[in-house]
Image: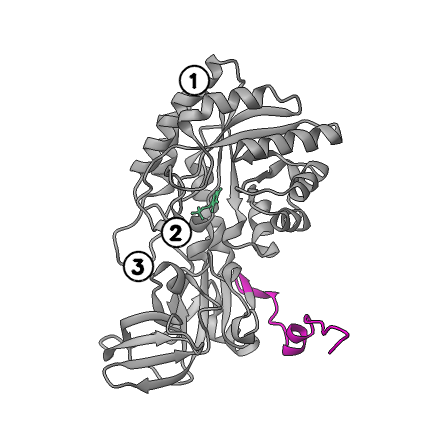
């Protein structure tokens, strides 16, 4: 559920007309709903209410400081995957004892920064990383709290590019070798082994892979305790999927996911962390774009937008489906036709939708991509020297530009010309 609804024939973000934002900031742009972000956060918070828990929002999904501050004020911690995200979380006022550091290739610089600034835990993904972390912590005279990310070899049954929990994937250490790796970690004087981490993929639309993975984690936790490790925290990752097609069967509910967690690992009495990204931010954001031309082709018609693949890359990269709706609500029974919806970039990949049934629209009309809040703005680029598009946050009847569109000069002046030219 989200707070983007038609009211008197016009699309609103909470209590603000999307067309009013477009008139003020220009198109294309992203708009997020505070109420939707908070609602999704609360669904998880309620789902885990019976367990000691922390929801560490995977901020790579949508990392604007206004978004993470909104969630942090509601009680969220952050899951970061780079030094940049760590700095961003701190800049937004997130307390460092609520920041977990994930990622398969943490550099010495990133590790040092996090140890200096403070960190809740590192989710370590390999033995070489463990060695480096132990060394750096030793040099600084501190102890680094860690979990080890295990790869449970479970098929998440999602898009290949976002499946992470199979033995062929680069993530974590094979669960079959976990006891050996924990023994190594346990012997390192500057590491404090506090728990287990797992994350099997993104956009999971079925709970069964979570169940399999968490059962394996529970078994491992008991073995590790038997081996003498004080396993007291489980980081169970993110990955719960969202409905990209609103009419389709709904993916699992956070409440059922919470019950699954209680059923599979609750008896261990560990503190539970989860790292949802997409489910919190995905349906809390739209990308709004203006139609530049409607063009008739040989065998199909095209809707050409001012938004492009550099602004929202998910369709090109993951064959992702986004619902596309007009900002002015079509009247009931309005005529529809099939269109390819495309951007202006010189690549056939710059196609948002093929043969999409759409109401008859015109140049100058606004359309909105639904479910664009996660992995939208954060994956955008300035390809074709197109400026990064603004981000806007709505809260009730207020809105604010939370990232402004750069001017051409600002973009161009980031280049420096060598002296020999
Ligand atoms: C990407 C990622 C997440 C978030 O995944 P969602 O599908 O957005 O919930 C959580 N944890 C880790 C380690 C990740 O890499």
Coordinates of residue 149 in the picture (x, y in percent): 48, 33
Q: Is residue 405 magenta?
A: yes
Q: Nearer the viewer, residue 300 or 333?
A: 300
Q: Nearer the viewer, mark 1 or mark 3?
A: 1
In the image, the residue with mark 1 has its CB under 8 Å from the nearest atom of ligand 1: no
Q: Quadrant of the C terminus?
A: bottom right
**Mark 3 Cα shell of 10 Å, populated few (<14), some (14-19), many (≥20):** some
Q: From the viewer's perspective, is residue 251 above or below residue 308?
A: above
Closest to the observer: 80 or 124? 124
Percent coordinates x, y for residue 65 in the rendering: 61, 55
Provide the residue span drawn in magenta: 392-421
User: Which SS class for mark 1?
Assistant: helix
Q: Is residue 96 left or right of residue 51?
A: right
From what the image shows, is residue 377 above or below residue 341?
above
Q: Quadrant of residue 189?
A: top right
Q: Does 148 sit above or below residue 357? A: above
Q: Residue at image x 47%, y 71%?
A: 17
Specify the label residue 222 is tagged with.
1
Q: Is residue 82 left or right of residue 294?
A: right
Distance Cα–Cα, label 3 vs label 2: 20 Å
- Mark 1: give few (<14), some (14-19) or many (20+) Cα within 10 Å: some
- Residue for point 35% across, 50% down: 160
Instruction: Say which quarter of the image contains residue 111.
Output: top right
Q: CA distance from mark 1 to mark 3?
A: 41 Å
Q: Residue furthest front?
A: 420
- Dot label at residue 245: 3
Q: Which residue is mark 2?
A: 161
């Amino acid at each position: 559920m989200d707070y983007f609804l038609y009211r008197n024939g016009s699309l609103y973000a909470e209590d603000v007309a999307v067309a009013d934002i477009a008139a003020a900031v220009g198109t294309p742009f992203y708009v997020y709903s505070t109420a939707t972000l908070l609602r999704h956060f609360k669904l998880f918070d309620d789902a885990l209410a019976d367990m000691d828990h922390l929801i560490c929002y995977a901020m790579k999904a949508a990392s604007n400081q206004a978004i993470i501050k909104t969630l942090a004020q509601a009680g969220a911690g952050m899951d970061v995957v780079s030094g940049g995200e760590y700095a961003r979380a701190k800049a937004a006022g997130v307390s460092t004892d609520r920041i977990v550091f994930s990622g398969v290739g943490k550099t010495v610089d990133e590790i040092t920064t996090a140890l200096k600034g403070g960190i809740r835990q590192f989710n370590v993904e390999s033995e070489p990383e463990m060695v480096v972390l132990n060394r750096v912590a030793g040099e600084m005279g501190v102890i680094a709290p860690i979990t080890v990310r295990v790869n449970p070899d479970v098929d998440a049954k999602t898009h290949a590019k976002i499946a992470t929990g199979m033995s062929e994937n680069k993530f974590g250490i094979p669960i079959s070798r976990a006891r050996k790796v924990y023994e190594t970690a346990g012997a390192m004087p500057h590491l404090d082994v506090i728990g287990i981490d797992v994350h099997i993929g993104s956009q999971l639309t079925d709970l069964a892979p979570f169940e399999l993975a968490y059962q394996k984690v529970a078994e491992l936790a008991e073995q590790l305790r038997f081996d003498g490790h004080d396993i007291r925290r489980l980081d169970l990752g993110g990955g719960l999927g969202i409905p990209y097609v609103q009419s389709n069967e709904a993916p699992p509910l956070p409440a059922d996911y919470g019950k699954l967690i209680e059923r599979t690992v609750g008896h261990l009495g560990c503190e539970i962390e989860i790292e949802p990204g997409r489910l919190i931010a995905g349906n809390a954001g739209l990308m709004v774009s203006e139609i530049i031309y409607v063009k008739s082709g040989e065998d199909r018609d095209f809707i050409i937008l001012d938004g492009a693949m550099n602004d929202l890359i998910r369709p090109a990269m993951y064959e992702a489906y986004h619902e596309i709706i007009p900002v002015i609500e079509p009247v009931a029974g309005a005529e529809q036709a099939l269109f390819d919806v495309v951007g202006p970039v010189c690549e056939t990949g710059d196609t948002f939708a093929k043969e999409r049934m759409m109401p008859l629209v015109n140049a100058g009309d606004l359309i909105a991509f639904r479910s664009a809040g996660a992995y939208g703005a954060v994956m955008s680029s300035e390809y074709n020297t197109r400026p990064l598009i603004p981000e806007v946050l709505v809260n009730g009847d207020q809105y604010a530009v939370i990232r402004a569109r750069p001017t051409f000069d600002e973009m161009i002046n980031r280049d420096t010309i060598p002296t020999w030219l």
